[in-house]
Image: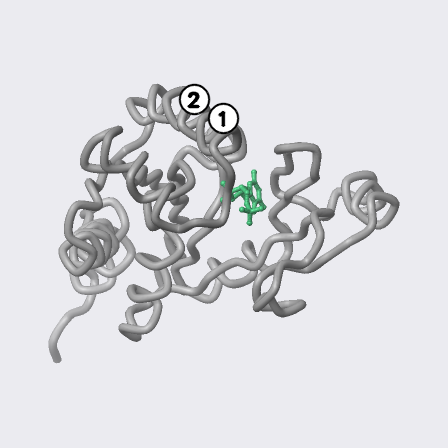
Amino acid sequence: MAKGILFVVSAPAGCGKDTILEKALAKEINLCYSVSATTRAMRAGETEGISYYFKTREEFEKMIADGELLEHTEYCGNYYGTPKQTVLETLELGQNVVLKIEIEGAENVKKLMPEAVLVFILPPSMQELDRRLHKRGTEDEETIAKRLKQAEKEISFAVNYDYVIVNDDLNKAVRDFVAIVDAESFRTNRNKEYIDLLKNFTVK
Ligand code: 5GP
């Protein structure tokens, strides 16, 4: 059985990565979501073990020391990290896994696992991103300005990713992501074992 593919999705806040992944995962494609660990406080509507594994700084630092994380980073004053064992075991079972992580984590994953497929979600324009951040109504002007500056920085990293998706139309962006997952699974180098199996099979 071929190993699963590791997908990594990054996007600046307001680009719709949560919704795109939610909709793609609901399509029953071969894709599992990897739940990260974090030290940030739980937000309304979030659930332990589904949104994140919520940890204290001490607990998180122990996970780092024990080598339990595939990658981790400090983002906006909080730790975020990907639990290693679940990801590796799921890939071994032939299931594709998706990580929804920021650019530094994505870069580290690519260094560790060059076969990982990196997908960056872009806004249609910076004006539209500004409009969407205002529409959410969850942040004040100063925070929105900070998020836009951060978005500019993050977008400059998109050139290091394997694919970019422009989230102009949500349903199309979901289709685009599913198309990437499908196309990657059809790559010849991911099907070598199957080709060998067929090649070596003699009909009696
Ligand atoms: P939030 O606090 O809004 O849920 O996430 C903040 C940022 O951290 C987002 O860009 C999110 O994708 C990223 N993030 C979430 N989990 C991880 C992780 O395990 N590792 C890294 N490097 N980033 C993560």
Q: Is residue 89 left or right of residue 198?
A: right
User: Looking at the picture, how far across and down is residue 3, in whole percent?
Assistant: 40, 57
Q: Give the residue drawn at x 31%, y 40%.
A: 119
Q: Is residue 191 left or right of residue 85?
A: left
Describe the element under mark 2 as helix, strand or loop.
helix
User: Looking at the picture, how far across and down is residue 47, in whole percent?
Assistant: 62, 69
User: Is the residue indicated by label 1 positioned so its CB lies within 8 Å of ligand 1?
Assistant: no
Q: Give the residue drawn at x 81%, y 44%.
A: 66
User: Looking at the picture, how far across and down is residue 26, in whole percent?
Assistant: 32, 73
Q: Nearer the viewer, residue 195 or 18?
A: 18
- Mark 2 crowdedness (10 Å alpha carbons): few <14, some 14-19, many ≥20: few
Badge number at residue 146 = 1
Q: Quadrant of residue 28?
A: bottom left
Describe the element under mark 1 as helix, strand or loop.
helix
Give the tally of numbered discs: 2
Mark 2–mark 1 CB contact (< 8 Å)? yes
Q: Which residue is mark 2?
A: 149
Badge number at residue 187 = none
- Mark 1 crowdedness (10 Å alpha carbons): few <14, some 14-19, many ≥20: few
Q: Quadrant of residue 122?
A: top left
Is residue 159 shown above or below 58?
Answer: above
Amino acid carrying mark 2 in the image: Lys
Q: Give the residue drawn at x 43%, y 65%.
A: 32
The quadrant of the picture showing ligand 1 is top right
